Image (cartoon, rainbow, N blue to C red):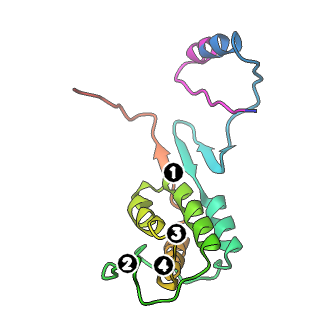
Amino acid sequence: MDDLVIRGEHIADIDHIKQLLSDRFKMKEIQELHYILRIEVIWTLDDIMISQLHYILNLLFRFGMTECKPIATPLDRNLKLDADSDTEECEPTNYRKLVRILIYLTITRPYLNYPIELLSQFMQTPQNIHVDCVKRMLRYISGIMDSAILYKSATQIRLKG
């Protein structure tokens, strides 16, 4: 089963798209969208907001960091990460799992792309310093977990080339 979200300004446009798709695919209309791919969709009268609050809460609970103290930055800016650190290597399976989970957060937090991409470079042979950085990311995320992306309907987008 695949999910499809259709959104438009006018019901007639949406109905037309549904008709075109129903000619090729078996479809059923469920309801107004609230969750898709672990992303919460919040509808207001005119705007749409997407959030991953529940995803983050589950993430922090899963890794035992629900009571962690939030911090202001995702990575220490004076930290130099490389594959040849003097710290011990750690078991890579949990590190890889956690970095993959963090990558999914970039859907609603694109500003986390750089620090998560930096940490993903050490997935082959992570060391304790890299695990500490991932834990720091979780502490940072715990402080910003209630942020979301707001799509305003009144915004006009103009593309110029």
Cα distance between the residues tagged 1 and 3 = 24 Å
- The outermost residue toward the left is 161
Three-letter code, disc 3:
Gln
Which span of residues is magenta-colored?
2-16
Q: Is residue 100 left or right of residue 71?
A: right
Q: Which residue is mark 1?
A: 107
Q: Which labelled disc corresponds to residue 147?
A: none
Give yes or no for contact between labels 1 and 3 (Cβ–Cβ under 8 Å): no
Q: Which residue is mark 3?
A: 124
**Tag nearer the camera, 2 or 1:** 2
Q: Which residue is mark 2?
A: 81
Most foreground residue, 114 or 128: 128
Specify few, some or many for label 4: CA neighbours under 10 Å numbering under 14, 14-19, or 20 or more. Answer: many
Most foreground residue, 143 or 73: 73
Image location (x, y in percent) of residue 118:
40, 67
Residue at x 55% of width, y 18% of height: 10
| Residue 108 in sight here | no
Give yes or no for contact between labels 2 and 1 (Cβ–Cβ under 8 Å): no
